[in-house]
Image: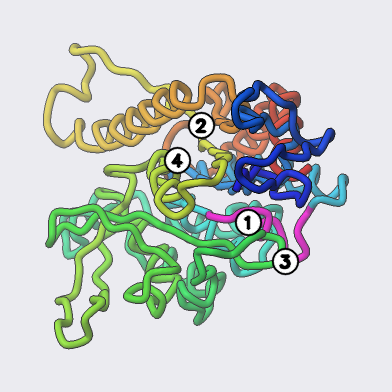
C-alpha cells in the first residue's frame, strides 16, 4: 500500500495500481512507466504531524522572579488569543522541566497556579526563603547547617504551602502517550544531584518509582544549592519493592543542569521519537559579576566558593543555549528567552525590595525585546 503521512483515504492506493492523489495534500514527484505507481509524494499540509511543546525553566534563586514574570507575559498573550488551556498554562505543554527555582515554578504551575500567581510567590515570600541575620550568615555555615548560609525552614514552609500534599504523580501526567496537553496534565521532570550515588537524578512524574514522592520534597531537593541551603535527604523507591534504596542525599540540580533544556530535549526525543519537538526555554538572567586573577575572590578559598558555584551555574546554562541553538538552527521550534541583567543583581539571594522590582523590570524589558520571536513561537506551538 502507498501510505501518505496525512492518512486521508484518497492518499492510499493498492500496490501496482495508480494512486488517486488528493490535490490538497500531495503532489506527484515522478512515476514509473512500468508499474504506473507514484514514487515520490510530498504532503503539503502539516497538521497531521504531532507536535510536542516543552517548557524548560532555569534555576536562579530569587531570580526565578524574572522567569515567572516572562511566563506571566506569555500567559497573558495566550489568554488574549483564546489559546490558554482550560487547566491553566501548564496544560499548554506536554512536558515541563525545571531546575531549582525553575522546579518550584514548574510544579507550582502544575498545581494550577497561574504564572502571575508564581510572580506573587516571589514577591511575598522571597525574604522568608532567604532569611538570615547578618550574624547568622556568618555563623550558620559554621555551626550545624551543612555549610549553608540559610536554614531550610522558610523554604520548606513556602514549598509546603504551594504544593500541599500533592505527589509528583498527582501533579503530572503518568501517561506518556497523551495526545494533547489541553486535555491532559503535562509530564513533569525536575533535576537534582545525588551525592551518595554520585549521579544526576531526574524525577519524572511518569516513572512509577517517583510517582509517590511528595512534590514539595522534590522541589526542595532541586533547590538545595550548595553554600545556600543544606542538602535534602529523602527516600526514593526503586522499581523493585523487594530492593529498597537507602535515603538519598540530594543537592541542587543546577550543578549539572541549571538550564535543563538539553535534558528536556533528550527526554522528549526518547518519549516521542517521531514527533516534532518545540522547546520554550526560560532563563533567569545572566550574571554580570566578573573577576580577574587579582580580585579578592581569588585570594582565598572562602571568598572563591560562591563565585565558583555561580559561574558554574551560568556557564552550564550558556553551553546548553549554544548547543540547542546549533541543533535547531533557524527552524523556529526553539525559543530561548534570556537577558543580561542591566538593573537587577545577579545574586541568587538578593531579596531587597529594590532588587525584586528590578527583576520584574528586567522581565518586562526582555519580553519587549523579543516580541516578534514570542509571537512567532506562540503561533507555531498553539495555532
Residue 33 counted in the magenta span:
no
Answer few, some or many: residues within 10 Å of disc 1's Cα (few below 14, many 20 plus, some between 14 and 19): many
Answer few, some or many: residues within 10 Å of disc 3's Cα (few below 14, many 20 plus, some between 14 and 19): some
Q: Are marks 4 and 3 in contact (CB under 8 Å)?
A: no
Residue placed at 48% from the left, 68% from the top? 159
Which tag is nearer the camera, tag 3 or tag 1? Answer: 3
Q: Give the Cα separation between the discs numbered 3 and 2.
A: 28 Å
Residue highlighted by disc 1: 118
Q: Give the Cα separation between the discs numbered 3 and 1.
A: 16 Å
Magenta segment, which residues?
84-95
Residue highlighted by disc 4: 261
Where disc 2 sits, the SS reads loop
Residue highlighted by disc 3: 87
Instruction: Identify the image quadrant of residue 378.
Output: top right
Q: Are marks 3 and 1 in contact (CB under 8 Å)?
A: no
> Does residue 115 lie above or below 255 as drawn?
below
Where disc 1 sits, the SS reads helix
Q: Give the Cα separation between the discs numbered 4 and 3.
A: 24 Å
Q: Are marks 4 and 1 in contact (CB under 8 Å)?
A: no
Q: Are marks 1 and 2 in contact (CB under 8 Å)?
A: no
User: Is residue 235 visible in the rendered structure shown here?
Assistant: no
The C terminus: image quadrant: top right
Amino acid at each position: 500500500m502507498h501510505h501518505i503521512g496525512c492518512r486521508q483515504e484518497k492518499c492510499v492506493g493498492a500496490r501496482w495500481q495508480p494512486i488517486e492523489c488528493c490535490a490538497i495534500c500531495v503532489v506527484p514527484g515522478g512515476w514509473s512507466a512500468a508499474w504506473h505507481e507514484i514514487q515520490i509524494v510530498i504532503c503539503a499540509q502539516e497538521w497531521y504531524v504531532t507536535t510536542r511543546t516543552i517548557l524548560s525553566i532555569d534555576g536562579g534563586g530569587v531570580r526565578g522572579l524574572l522567569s515567572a514574570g516572562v511566563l506571566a507575559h506569555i500567559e497573558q498573550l495566550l489568554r488574549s488569543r483564546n489559546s490558554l488551556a482550560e487547566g491553566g498554562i501548564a496544560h499548554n505543554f506536554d512536558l515541563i522541566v525545571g531546575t531549582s527555582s525553575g522546579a518550584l515554578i514548574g510544579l507550582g504551575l502544575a498545581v494550577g497556579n497561574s504564572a502571575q500567581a508564581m510572580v506573587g510567590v516571589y514577591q511575598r515570600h522571597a525574604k522568608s526563603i532567604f532569611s538570615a541575620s547578618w550574624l547568622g550568615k556568618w555563623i550558620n555555615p559554621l555551626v550545624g547547617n551543612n555549610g549553608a548560609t540559610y536554614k531550610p525552614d522558610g523554604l520548606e514552609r513556602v514549598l509546603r504551602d504551594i504544593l500541599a500534599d500533592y505527589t509528583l504523580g498527582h501533579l503530572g501526567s503518568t501517561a506518556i502517550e497523551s495526545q494533547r496537553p489541553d486535555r491532559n496534565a503535562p509530564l513533569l521532570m525536575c533535576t537534582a544531584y545525588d551525592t551518595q550515588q554520585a549521579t544526576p537524578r531526574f524525577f519524572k512524574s511518569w516513572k512509577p518509582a517517583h510517582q509517590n514522592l511528595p512534590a514539595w520534597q522534590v522541589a526542595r531537593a532541586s533547590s538545595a544549592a550548595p553554600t545556600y541551603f543544606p542538602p535534602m535527604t529523602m527516600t526514593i523507591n526503586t522499581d523493585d519493592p523487594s530492593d529498597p534504596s537507602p535515603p538519598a542525599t540530594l543537592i541542587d540540580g543546577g550543578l549539572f543542569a541549571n538550564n535543563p533544556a538539553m535534558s528536556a530535549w533528550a527526554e522528549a526525543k526518547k518519549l516521542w521519537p517521531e514527533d516534532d519537538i518545540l522547546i520554550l526555554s526560560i532563563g533567569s538572567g545572566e550574571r554580570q559579576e566578573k573577576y580577574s586573577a587579582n580580585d579578592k575572590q581569588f585570594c582565598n578559598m572562602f571568598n572563591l566558593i560562591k563565585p565558583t558555584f555561580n559561574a558554574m551555574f551560568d556557564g552550564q546554562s550558556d553551553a546548553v543555549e549554544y548547543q540547542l541553538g546549533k541543533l535547531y538552527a533557524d527552524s523556529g521550534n526553539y525559543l530561548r528567552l534570556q537577558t543580561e541583567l542591566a538593573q537587577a543583581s545577579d545574586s541568587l539571594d538578593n531579596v531587597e525590595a529594590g532588587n525584586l522590582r528590578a527583576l520584574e523590570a528586567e522581565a518586562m524589558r526582555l519580553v519587549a525585546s523579543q516580541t516578534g520571536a514570542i509571537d512567532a513561537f506562540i503561533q507555531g506551538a498553539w495555532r
